Image: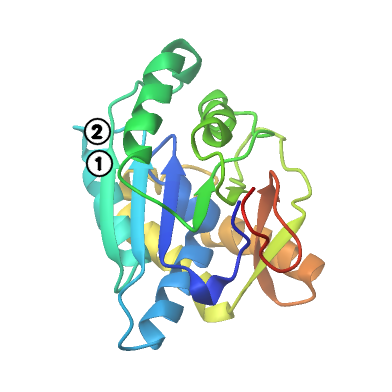
Amino acid sequence: MRTLIPEALDELVLLAAHCDDIPLGAGGTVLTLCRARQALGAVPPLRVRALVLSGGGTPREDEERAALAAFCPGADLAVTVRDMPDGRLPHHWQWAKEALEEFRRTCEPDLVLAGHRGDDHQDHRGLARLVPTVFRDHLALGYEILKAEPDLAQPPLLWPLEPEVVAEKSRLLHEHYPSQVSRAWFDDEAFSGLARIRGVQAGVRYAEGFHLTRALLGPPVPSR
């Protein structure tokens, strides 16, 4: 199992049930990681591999590809968007597991960002439960998505964000997901409001919250 040293990340995996889950839940963190790698200059770019289980072959796929390109500046980015029916992951459990296994053979991440098991949406929750069965020895963090369901829990891990990153996240969400802008929850106040709450809890202005499955504390230990 890997410990998290953000400056040492070489490969980042992003997993989602739906188009827009990743930017909504972890857009500020992804922007921060990619820009930090850019700032190092001559080193190889951060490899980012993304798998989205639904939206393939629809205008939502086009939105997602453009959005992730914007949220991952300078990265070596590859995006896979599959065609699972929205809201039906429990009925496509085997298909989802096989899609995740197939994707796993294409990457070797230092960090995996996905949904978390406490999410009330069946697709988010189902994918989160599959992640540790496929990425068994990887550090996986579960992002939170604000929505109508009253499922927000206190995330134990908080990632500080600069104010300009929060503003950029909101701008990119509005720019790249026109299909979602009419939704009541899709606005600047919702995006910055949750980040402000997590920031208060982190002792900074803004932050994103993540749920942790397991991690090692202290220096690396040899494999047994």
Using residue 18 as the reference point, say whether residue 213 is left or right of it.
right
* Image x and y of residue 129, in percent: 59, 29
Instruction: In the rendered structure, find residue 169 and report the number of the disc placed on it.
Output: none
The one nearer the camera, 36 or 18, is 36
Q: Is residue 54 visible?
A: no
Q: Residue at x 32, y 61 (%)?
A: 175
The answer to whether the residues at label 2 and label 1 have Cβ atoms under 8 Å apart is yes
* Image x and y of residue 94, in percent: 42, 15
Q: Amino acid at mark 2?
A: Gly
* Image x and y of residue 223, in percent: 61, 52
Q: Residue at x 69, y 48 (%)?
A: 211
Q: Amino acid at mark 1?
A: Glu
User: Residue at label 1?
Assistant: 61
Q: Secondary structure at mark 1?
A: helix
* Image x and y of residue 9, in percent: 47, 68
User: Residue at label 2?
Assistant: 56
Name which of mark 2 and mark 1 comes first in the sequence. 2
- Measured Cα–Cα span from mark 2 to mark 1: 5 Å
Q: Residue at x 53, y 62 (%)?
A: 188
